[in-house]
Image (cartoon, rainbow, N blue to C red):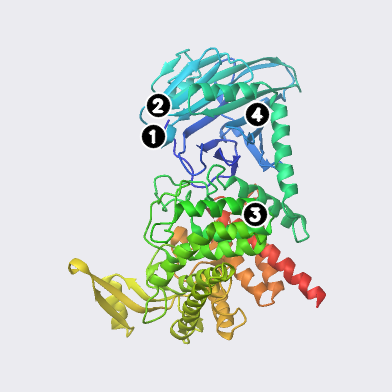
């Protein structure tokens, strides 16, 4: 079928082994297994009703007047979709979920006759797989004994079937043929598409019938069929009940929501549930978001593990009582560390290097900082001993990366992955990483290392204060030694800005501006969370005021990343808005933090997920659903606010 997939999705379902993304109409767009970052296997899956004359109505779309309501089951990762049309005599209620501790995705459809006469119709499912994201060498076959379509390619097998016996099938079918509704019984084809249909006969007015669809995965045909047989051994209602009970128990085992309010509690519980889906069961890596731009048409992809994101996320996990996920993540980081002690920009679930724009020094720094935050939460000596060798190598790399003359880290790629400079945020992250490493060294009674690392960190803090302050704008510079193109360099120097041209190898040159004066939300990271400068320091206060004044988006509200941001239109982000909330709490302005928190809550999606960006004109979701970092910043914000409010009552 080669369908065009949307950038924005409305929901995700999974169990940390299977992950799938869906639209609000119940259409399944993507499916990952056996890891949640890659590979992705589904091209398209469509569902329709077929009438006696052979015509079809696709109820997972908006044709034929279909209207949909979508929501997660309360305290569960089961998605419920209701589809109704005034033009059709059938209402469809469907539940979509992955069964815990299995390789099974379930899509349970309940059809109700809303007319006044008995009704007969067919339920047709079209499934198109591009297994392992590859259009070559796929095979689709109908396995008669199992009454299942099996899609397979090179070690990935997916059995698609129901508990109900199908009436018709076809392996290898074009989209044009599907729309004719005539399935010819072909049982094997080296094409990725297949279709199945089930018959409903004389359904009485007001009566309902349920047809579950199973997608069972395995490394070979036998494994997939064993998973399918297990699904069929119980009713789909039992699978629903088992899955809902699992997720309810998961929420119960988490820390309770620290703030009152139905909306806050609902979003907190949704965050707890979402975190589990973003953590890979087999490796412990945590992805930034389910992939939605496979061809890198508008971005560089999101289904990778960033150490920076994960440091914020694991700190939130610990607050939420999900420290086992943090344990598994930091065990995973040991597999991702490079031989030189660095952690690169982003990684696959197996620790391998993912597509990259170059070294981001804040990534490894954040991991070491996050390790210490996790240790402080659990106070587990075994954890400290486990990570200590990696901390040593990581801190040694950071020390080597510091410029001996300035005391600041050398230029690298910024946290937004757009420019090269000695970024002030990145310098603060290195400060945080080195102070964390020094704390580990003291714990291990390595006092000389601890002293050396603290001395280097203190020098970074001093250099930030002396070399990175922009009095003219009342803010810290975003960075120093900014690499720019030749045209921009010439224009800037002509305007009186300080710069230089550096000679590189093989006759190449690099154009460098001494200062980057752009106001950027990440400047708050100097204080929160890394504390290279105290939150209450006058310069931090002035920086925060400059951030709010320069980056608040008119009309819609919220905080964008930086002044001249053009990515996806330059919108406000959830996480940036909550970053300012964190800073406001740190300086005692809880009321302002509450307002920023409320803005984030009001801009969650229909299904209660937090996106990355909000459209600066319409206020609607603009990009990436869900973003794990957004949910982490929300969880951190509510715990910070709760702790501040509790402290104020005591005082």
Q: Which residue is mark 4?
A: 108
Q: Quadrant of residue 14?
A: top right
Task: Find the residue positioned furthest to the right.
Answer: 650
Element at label 1: loop
Spatial distance from mark 2 to mark 1, Cα to Cα? 8 Å
Q: Nearer the viewer, mark 2 or mark 3?
A: 3
Using the image, determine if residue 310 lies above or below residue 94: below
The percent position of residue 130, horizontal first and vertical second, equals 43, 32
For the residue pair 215 and 571, the one nearer the viewer reads as 215
Contact between marks 2 and 1 (CB within 8 A): the answer is: yes
Q: Which residue is mark 1?
A: 134
Residue 190 image point, x, y percent:
38, 22
Q: Residue 323, labelled with which disc?
A: 3
Nearer the camera: disc 1 or disc 4: 1
Camera-nearest residue between 85 and 443:
443
4 or 3: tag closer to the N-terminus: 4
Q: Which residue is mark 2?
A: 138
Q: Which circle's residue, 4 or 2, is located before the other in the chain? A: 4
CA gap, disc 3 to disc 1?
37 Å
Task: Report x, y in % for residue 565.
Answer: 45, 66
In the displayed structure, 450 sits above or below 134; it is below
> Mark 3 vs mark 1: which is more N-terminal?
1
Q: Is residue 84 shown above or below 577?
A: above
With 255 as the anchor, is 121 left or right in this view? left
Q: CA distance from mark 4 to mark 3?
A: 33 Å
Asked whether the beta carbons under mark 3 and mark 1 sit within 8 Å of each other, the answer is no
Q: Earlier in the sequence, mark 1 or mark 4?
A: 4
**Residue drawn at point x = 50 percent, y = 54 percent:** 333
- The first of marks 2 and 3 along the sequence is 2
Secondary element under disc 4, as helix, strand or loop, is strand
Q: Residue at x 60, y 36 (%)?
A: 26
């Amino acid at each position: 079928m080669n369908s065009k997939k949307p950038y924005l999705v409305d929901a995700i379902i999974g169990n940390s082994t299977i992950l799938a993304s869906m639209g609000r109409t119940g259409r399944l767009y993507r499916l990952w297994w056996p890891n949640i970052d890659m590979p992705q296997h589904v091209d398209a899956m469509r569902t329709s009703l077929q009438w006696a004359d052979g015509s079809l109505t696709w109820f997972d779309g908006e044709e034929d007047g279909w209207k949909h309501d979508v929501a997660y089951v309360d305290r569960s990762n089961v998605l419920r979709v209701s589809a109704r049309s005034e033009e059709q005599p059938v209402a469809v209620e469907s539940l979509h979920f992955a069964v815990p501790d299995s390789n099974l995705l379930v899509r349970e459809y309940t059809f109700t006759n809303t007319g006044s006469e008995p009704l007969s119709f067919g339920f047709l499912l079209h499934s198109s797989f591009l297994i392992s994201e590859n259009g070559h060498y796929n095979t689709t076959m109908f396995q008669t004994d199992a009454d299942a379509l099996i899609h397979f390619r090179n070690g990935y097998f997916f059995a698609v079937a129901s508990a109900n016996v199908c009436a018709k099938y076809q392996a290898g079918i074009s989209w044009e043929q599907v729309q004719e509704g005539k399935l010819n019984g072909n049982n094997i084809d080296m094409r990725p598409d297949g279709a199945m249909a089930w018959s409903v006969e004389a359904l009485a007015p007001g009566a309902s019938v349920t047809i579950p669809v199973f997608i069972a995965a395995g490394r070979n045909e036998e494994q997939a069929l064993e998973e399918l047989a297990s699904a069929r051994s119980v009713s789909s209602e039992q699978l629903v009940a088992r899955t809902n009970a699992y997720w309810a128990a998961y929420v119960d085992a988490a820390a309770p929501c620290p703030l009152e309010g139905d909306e806050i509690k609902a979003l907190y519980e949704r965050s707890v549930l979402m975190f589990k889906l973003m953590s890979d069961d087999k490796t412990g890596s945590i992805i930034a978001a389910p992939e939605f731009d496979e061809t890198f048409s508008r971005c560089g992809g999101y289904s990778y593990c960033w150490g920076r994101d994960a440091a914020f996320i694991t700190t939130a996990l610990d607050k939420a009582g999900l420290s086992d996920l943090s344990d598994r993540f930091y065990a995973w980081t040991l597999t991702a560390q490079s031989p030189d002690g660095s952690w690169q920009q982003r990684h696959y679930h197996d620790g391998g290097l993912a597509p990259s724009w170059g070294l981001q020094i804040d990534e490894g720094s954040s991991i070491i900082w996050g390790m210490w935050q996790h240790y402080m939460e659990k106070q587990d000596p075994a954890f400290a001993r486990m990570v200590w060798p990696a901390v040593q190598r990581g801190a040694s790399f950071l020390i080597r990366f510091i410029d001996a003359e300035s005391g600041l880290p050398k230029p690298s790629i910024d946290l937004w992955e757009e420019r090269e400079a000695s970024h002030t945020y990145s310098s603060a992250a290195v400060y945080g990483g080195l102070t964390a490493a020094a704390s580990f060294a003291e714990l291990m009674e390595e006092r000389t290392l601890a002293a050396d690392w603290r001395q280097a960190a203190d020098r970074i803090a001093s250099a930030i204060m002396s070399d990175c302050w922009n009095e003219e704008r009342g803010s810290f510079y975003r960075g120093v030694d900014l690499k720019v193109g030749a045209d921009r360099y010439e224009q800037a120097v002509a305007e009186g800005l300080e710069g230089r041209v550096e000679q590189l190898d093989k006759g190449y040159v690099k154009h460098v501006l001494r200062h980057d004066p752009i106001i950027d939300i990440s400047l708050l990271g100097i204080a929160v969370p890394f504390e290279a400068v105290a939150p209450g320091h006058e310069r931090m206060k002035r920086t925060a005021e400059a951030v709010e004044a320069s980056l608040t988006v008119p009309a819609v509200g919220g905080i964008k990343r930086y002044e001249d941001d053009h990515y996806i239109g330059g919108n406000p982000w959830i996480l940036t808005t909550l970053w300012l909330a964190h800073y406001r709490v740190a300086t005692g302005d809880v009321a302002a933090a509450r307002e920023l928190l409320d803005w984030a809550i009001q801009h969650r999606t229909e299904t209660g997920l937090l996106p990355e960006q909000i459209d600066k004109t319409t206020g609607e979701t603009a990009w990436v659903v869900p973003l794990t970092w957004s949910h982490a910043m929300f969880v951190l914000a509510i715990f910070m606010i709760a702790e501040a409010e509790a402290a104020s009552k005591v005082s």
